[in-house]
Image (cartoon, helix red, strand yellow):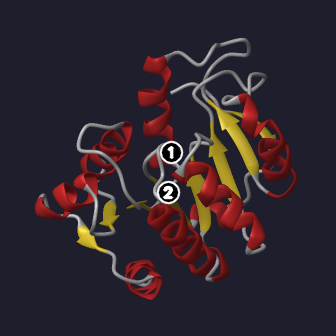
Amino acid sequence: MRKLSVLGKILKSDANAIAVVGARKMSPRGRRLTAKFVDKLAKAGYTIVSGLAIGIDTAAHEAALRAGGRTIAVLGSGIDIIYPYSNKDLAGRIAKSGAVVSAFPKGTKPFGKNFLARNRIIVGLAKAVLVIEGARRSGTLSTASWAANDGKDVFAIPGSEATDWLIDQGATVAKTPEEVIEYLDAANHC
């Protein structure tokens, strides 16, 4: 894997990270759940990793910042091309207290194929993945698949096509943020 380009800083404490992913077409329920789970995870000392996409990713980064926590945004483009452009200000705020990263050379446009590679980087930076909601066929499932293949825990909140399918496949049910934190804290002490 090529070296990551970074805006901001990656700290040693960022090794204690969880990826939070989900639908770009976020439901009001998805927005509420993202805010609730990320607030608790960030306040418990977990760095939130996501992909800066519209929807759940944006909500996760914003919730981490509101909670005073750290967040890392992984781009599917070069570090000099913030995509979507509507998240340019958000990327700037993330870089001030966390990091914006890319595995692509400067000037790389946000082509569709890049987002599957980006999902692998998201997983690589996290100890576990929390899937908030999503469609049965989505990039969200590719992120969960990378995590499962890497032997990382996948948590899923019941109530959407993607999360219900993941639970059927063996993902850990995430009913409350406290359950996720308790599980991760126990795993960290093993």
Residue on which disc 1 sits: 122
Residue on which disc 2 sits: 19
* Quadrant in which residue 186 is drawn: bottom left
- Above or below, 50 against 185 in this view is above
- Above or below, 140 against 166 in this view is above
Q: Residues within 10 Å of mark 2 (few under 14, many from 20)?
A: many
Image coords of residue 7 (percent x, y): 81, 39
Image coords of residue 36 (percent x, y): 55, 77
138 sits left or right of 62 in the view: left
- Above or below, 40 against 49 in this view is below
In the image, which disc is placed on residue 75?
none
The answer to whether marks 1 and 2 mark residues whose Cβ atoms lie closer than 8 Å is yes
- Above or below, 88 against 170 in this view is above
Image coords of residue 174 (percent x, y): 33, 76
Q: In which quarter of the image is the C terminus?
A: bottom left
Which SS class for mark 2? strand
Which residue is pictured at 41% across the width and 29% down the height?
116
Which residue is pictured at 68% across the width and 21% down the height?
78
Which residue is pictured at 27% across the width and 59% down the height?
163
Of mark 1 and mark 2, the one earlier in the sequence is 2
Which residue is pictured at 43% across the width and 84% down the height?
189
